[in-house]
Image: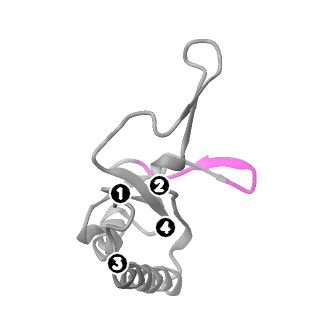
């Protein structure tokens, strides 16, 4: 079953993290990604740009609205994702626990309701 690990944490201000802290974080995520790949559970991963570089698009009002930045200001932002394929929620939680981001933020574990595979929507896992 596919699960997405959504990494949420406060975005550091420019200069808030030393080069040593950045290098240590990169090394930790590199090791984590390699562990996921070695276990054969990694589908994909993305580190997202800061919310200041995002654009929000909506048609809710009936016409196109494009807004620079996130839809809502929050203390923590979605910073990245890992999509994994594991037997169950407990296994997904186990991988979330090992994620470096859990040390300074939160890792949301969310099961896939459906997945697009080879251009076809298929059944994913069920909640629970």
Of callouts 1 and 2, the N-terminal one? 1
Mark 3 against mark 4, which lies toward the viewer?
Answer: 3
Please give the residue where the numbered disc 4 appears in the rendered image: 84
Left or right of residue 66: residue 112: left
Q: Are marks 1 and 2 in contact (CB under 8 Å)?
A: yes
Q: Is residue 4 visible in this depiction of the protein? A: no
Q: Quadrant of residue 94?
A: bottom left
Q: Give how far across and how far down residue 110 sits, in percent.
A: 39, 53
Q: Residues within 10 Å of mark 2 (few under 14, many from 20)?
A: some
Q: Looking at the image, which residue is at 27% across and 68% down?
A: 102
State which mark lies toward you, 1 or 4.
1
Could you tell me how far apart the alpha carbons at marks 3 and 1 are, in whole angstroms?
14 Å
User: Closer to the N terminus: mark 3 or mark 1?
Assistant: 1
Residues tagged 3 and 1 counted as in contact (Cβ below 8 A): no
Q: Tag 1, which secondary structure?
A: loop
> Reading the chain from its start, which is encountered first: label 1 or label 4?
1
Answer whether labels 3 and 4 touch (C-beta < 8 Å): no
- Which residue is under mark 1? 11
Q: Residues within 10 Å of mark 3 (few under 14, many from 20)?
A: few
The total number of labels drawn is 4
Quickly name the residue at label 2: 50
Residue at the disc numbered 3: 18
Does 60 appear above or below 98? above
Task: Give the residue furthest to the right.
Answer: 119
In this view, the residue in front, 56 or 124, is 56
Nearer the observer, 20 or 81: 20
Q: Per the image, is 120 magenta?
A: yes
Q: Of 93 and 103, which appears nearest the observer?
A: 103
Q: Residue furthest top?
A: 62
User: Which range is magenta?
Assistant: 117-126
The Cα–Cα distance between marks 3 and 4, rounded to whole angstroms, is: 31 Å
């Amino acid at each position: 079953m596919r699960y997405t690990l959504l990494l949420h944490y406060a975005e550091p201000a420019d200069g808030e993290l030393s080069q040593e802290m950045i290098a240590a974080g990169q090394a930790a995520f590199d090791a984590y990604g390699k562990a996921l790949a070695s276990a054969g559970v990694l589908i994909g991963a993305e580190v997202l740009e800061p919310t200041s570089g995002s654009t929000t698009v909506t048609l809710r009002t009936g016409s196109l609205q494009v807004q620079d930045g996130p839809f809502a200001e929050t203390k923590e932002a979605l910073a990245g994702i890992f999509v994994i394929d594991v037997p169950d929620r407990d296994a997904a939680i186990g991988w979330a626990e090992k994620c470096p981001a859990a040390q300074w933020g939160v890792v949301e574990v969310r099961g896939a309701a459906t997945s697009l595979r080879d251009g076809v929507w298929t059944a994913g896992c069920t909640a629970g």
